[in-house]
């Protein structure tokens, strides 16, 4: 029996480093591997989970949405997001979960002691990662969610999508061409891939920002995007995406093995990851 992270491409994935460390630590006697797969192999992989030939799967880009149609059931969180990243057998059914959003909020609550309740959040991006994070922000009862995205239509779609579930949600449209958060904003999150390439710098006007503002860029490679560097130099608390990656892995691990990963094991694996890229 094995576990896999599947996607295309998959070479860059840090998930094997994280899970194999905990698997060894808890003497589980399995191996977590990465597997580059084509769309056509998704159904057969799900069948292997059903037959217990595979213990569990993580799913990454570009299959987080496509794979939903092959599993038997998905969680409410996964329904909200419209994507899954974790698969396992539950009561003989192949079950899909999404741990990305909770990974994000766990990272903020633990590393930055951030309390989401009643806060104003400024989200950059309206892609898959943004849906995952926003669905969890809503669960945490934040006050206001501003959304800015390069393609305006996708911002409108995202706001409509969540508003259809709950009309009372307080969403505000923010202009990508003029990123200028107000003084009520407590947290800025970059969920876009802009910043992964050298010299990609997202300009944000900081003149209204409060001193306690936190900036999170969910990119972890490079370790510090130009955006993070700029905010760090200006004295703001900053965080890259590595903690989120490890926290979402910890939630997946708990689903597979019913073992809750403690803060010490999170920190241990973080150090290993930091050295590995
Ligand atoms: P993910 O699941 O990682 O969020 P995605 O669904 O493809 O991936 O979304 C990518 C996000 O990054 C989108 O918000 C995208 O903006 P568009 O909707 O305008 O495409 C954003 N993005 C990617 N490259 C970008 C760039 N060069 N400049 C600005 N935004 C970019």
Image (cartoon, helix red, strand yellow):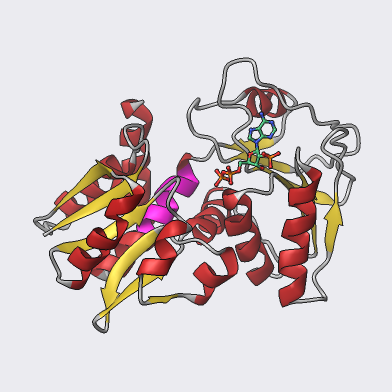
Image x and y of residue 242, in percent: 46, 40
Direction from residue 151 to residue 110 in the image, left or right:
left
Q: Which SS does the magenta portion mostly show?
A: helix
* Front residue of 28 and 201: 201
Direction from residue 56 to residue 121 in the image, left or right:
right
* Front residue of 34 and 215: 34
Quadrant that contains the N terminus: bottom left
The verdict on residue 247 being magenta is yes
The answer to whether residue 118 is seen in the rendering is no
Image x and y of residue 138, in percent: 68, 67
* Front residue of 8 and 210: 8
Q: Residue at x 49, y 56 (%)?
A: 100
- Residue at far top of view: 199
> Is 87 situated above or below 92?
above
What is the quadrant of residue 66 in the picture?
Answer: bottom left
Direction from residue 197 to residue 23 in the image, left or right:
left
- Residue at far front of view: 40
Q: Residue at x 63, y 36 (%)?
A: 238
Please state the quadrant of the image where ligand 1 appears.
top right
Image x and y of residue 93, in percent: 29, 79
Part of the protein shown in magenta: 243-250
What is the quadrant of residue 57 in the picture?
Answer: bottom left
> Is 159 situated above or below 205?
below
The verdict on residue 38 being magenta is no
- Residue at far bottom of view: 91
Numbered marks: total: 0
Image x and y of residue 165, in percent: 71, 76
The answer to whether residue 145 is seen in the rendering is yes
Quadrant that contains the C terminus: top left
């Amino acid at each position: 029996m094995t576990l896999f992270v599947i996607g295309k491409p998959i070479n860059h994935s840090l998930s094997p480093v994280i899970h194999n460390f905990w698997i060894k630590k808890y003497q589980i006697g399995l191996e977590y591997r990465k597997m580059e797969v084509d769309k056509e192999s998704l159904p057969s992989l799900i069948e292997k989970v059903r037959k217990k030939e595979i213990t569990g799967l993580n799913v990454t880009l570009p299959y987080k949405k496509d794979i939903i149609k092959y599993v038997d059931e998905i969680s409410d969180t996964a329904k909200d997001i419209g994507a899954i990243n974790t698969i396992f057998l539950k009561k003989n059914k192949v079950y899909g979960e999404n741990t990305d959003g909770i990974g994000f909020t766990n990272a903020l609550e633990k590393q930055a002691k951030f309390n989401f309740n009643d806060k104003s959040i400024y989200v950059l991006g309206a892609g898959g990662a943004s849906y995952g994070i926003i669905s969890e922000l809503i669960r945490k009862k934040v006050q206001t969610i501003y959304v800015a995205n390069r393609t305006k239509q996708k911002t409108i779609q995202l706001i409509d999508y969540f508003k259809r579930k709950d009309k009372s949600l307080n969403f505000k449209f923010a202009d990508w061409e003029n990123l200028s958060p107000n003084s009520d904003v407590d947290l800025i999150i970059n969920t876009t891939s802009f910043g992964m390439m050298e010299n990609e710098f997202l300009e944000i006007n900081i003149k209204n920002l409060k001193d306690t503002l936190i900036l999170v860029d969910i990119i972890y490679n490079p370790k510090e995007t130009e955006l993070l560097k700029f905010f760090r130099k200006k004295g703001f608390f900053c965080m890259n995406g590595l903690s989120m990656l490890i926290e979402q892995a910890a939630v997946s691990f708990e689903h597979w093995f019913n073992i809750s990963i403690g803060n010490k094991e999170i920190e241990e694996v973080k150090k290993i990851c930091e050295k590995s890229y």
